[in-house]
Image: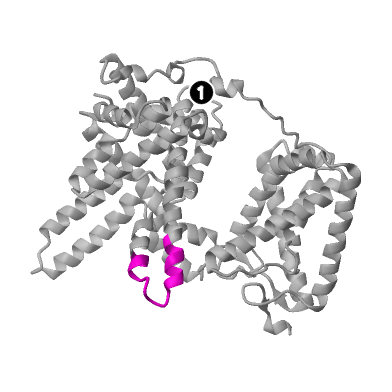
Amino acid sequence: MWNIKEIKRKGKKTLKNNLWTLLFLGLFMPLAIGRYMLNNDGFSNLKTLYEHIVNQNESEENNQDHIANEIVNKIISQIFTGNVTGIINDYNEKHNVTKGAIYTTFNILTKGQQQLQNTINSIMNYENKEAVRSIILIIASMLGFLIRVFLVYPIRISESRIYLESINYKKTRIKRITYAFKNGRYLNSVKTLLLIEIKKFLWNLTIVGGIIKNYSYKMVTYIIAENTSISAEDAIKMSEEMMNGNKLQAFKLDVSFLGWSILQYITFGILGIYVSPYYTSTYTVLYETLREDYIKNKKYKYELLNDYKLFEINDLEKYPDIYEAERKRIKIDYNKKYEISSIILFFFIFSFIGWIWEVSLYLFRDGMLVNRGTLHGPWLPIYGWGCTIIILLTRFKKFREILKNPVLTFIIIVIVCSIIEYMTSWYIELVSGLRYWDYTGVFLNLNGRICFECSAFFGLGGALCVYIVAPFLERKIQKIMKRTKIIICIILLSLITIDNCYSIKYPNMGEGISIVVEENK
């Protein structure tokens, strides 16, 4: 029988091998697929079992005991699932946090996946006056289901692959998150996890059976991540064989993370950024241990577990994936000077992308199709200026040296974009008495003009722009004849100049577009 302390020790070593990659993955996965910072399968099982026992033993004759059970149940629910909704909501109410990406994301993560329930409710309410909204909700629910199956499932397999490679390789990159999408791995990854979800759903109807089977299927993602050609049925059976006689010990392993769960609870979930990869690294090492015993004892189709490169100790820094070696690499040169014509075109491209982003955001969030921005054309100059100024900085040798440090680059971009956004908001309000954005009610905002989450978003977007998007666009723009580029630039500059002149007299305003600031009238 394997030792829990030894498994956790090796799990920490695996985490250390690729610390920053796995920490970023621990932050990325909740946002990408709606999981808690702490992988709470085991803790959810404890909560479910506890609720079942409490419901069985509740006595209507003793109301005080019933209330006490509810309180204890709530506390256990929060601790074991990492769900600190109450504390966060209290903070939000106290500081008037009522909107924003962080606020919305938290609500999504704590409420979990409810597509099926939303669909049922929508169908039941179809005949009322909200018929159109119900139809939209049904479509959105089905879209959410499709995203979960065809995007989230392969990402989960890729995540397991990254952790497997981290056992013996010290330079596993986050780009391996696309692993399951390539080279014939995709469909089997989707099929396997979809079958698992169906089986879990059916077993969960029996409560205790769901808990047992949850542990039986623990190794499926690792099995598929090792060999994506293994069929769904075989992967499930292999996982059941692998976990046979190990489920109770795995349950104890989950319980050993209770202290970390409490710390996460105290830190409002922030510590989950570390706990999640630590937990997953530990289970990855457990898979390695059980796999070795599985092969040694020649259990069901053991010969399919044949990716020995994953588990052999060697001096290589990264996994020698034959597909990676054969793939033609495109070198991205971000440390370069751009032509003036390219920079002008960058301005309009990013202004248009910003306009598309905000129009889509309002359409999705509020169901309103509005022409966002200070101007009437399909562009938001603040996005264009932000990215253009960052690109202009690359003309300075000092900034090109800074680009070698992505973290410092991100910080500088955040500062630059925050200043641009704040000054733009202040200037527009001063001149026109209008606000085209207001972050009041958003977590960590400054006078409603800028906020932490948007500044961080601009920092990430700016870094993506300068490292990847701008070099990519430059390669495409260089294929255009110089004379044609100049003509396009002149036409676009003329159009936006006309738009600016017209908008000074007739500003773009209305519901969902601008806010009149009374005190400045």
Picture quadrant of residue 6: top left
Could you tell me if residue 83 is visible in this image?
Answer: yes
Residue 342 vs residue 9, the one in the foreground: 342
Residue 519 vs residue 239, the one in the foreground: 239
Q: Is residue 306 located in the magenta-colored stretch of the structure?
A: no
What span is in magenta?
121-138
Q: Which colour scheme is used?
A: one colour
In the displayed structure, 421 sits above or below 259; it is below
Task: Rate crowding at label 1 as few (under 14), some (14 to 19) or many (20 or more) other CA atoms within 10 Å.
Answer: many
Q: Which quadrant holds the N terminus?
A: top left
Q: Residue at x 83, y 52 (%)?
A: 344
Could you tell me if residue 258 is visible in this image?
Answer: no
Image location of residue 285, percent across then percent down: 38, 27
The residue at the far front in this view is: 127
In the displayed structure, 53 sits above or below 191; it is below
Q: Residue at x 48, y 27 (%)?
A: 166
Q: In this view, does 166 lie to the left or right of 198?
A: right
Residue 40 vs residue 297, the one in the foreground: 297
Q: Name the residue under label 1.
A: 169
Q: What residue type is labelled 1?
A: Tyr
Image location of residue 320, percent across then percent down: 54, 19
In the displayed structure, 126 sits above or below 203; it is below
The residue at the far right in this view is: 483
Q: Which residue is drawn at 82% across and 39% down?
A: 478
Image location of residue 9, percent across then percent down: 38, 28
Picture quadrant of residue 381: bottom right
- Which secondary structure type mostly characterizes the magenta part of the structure? helix
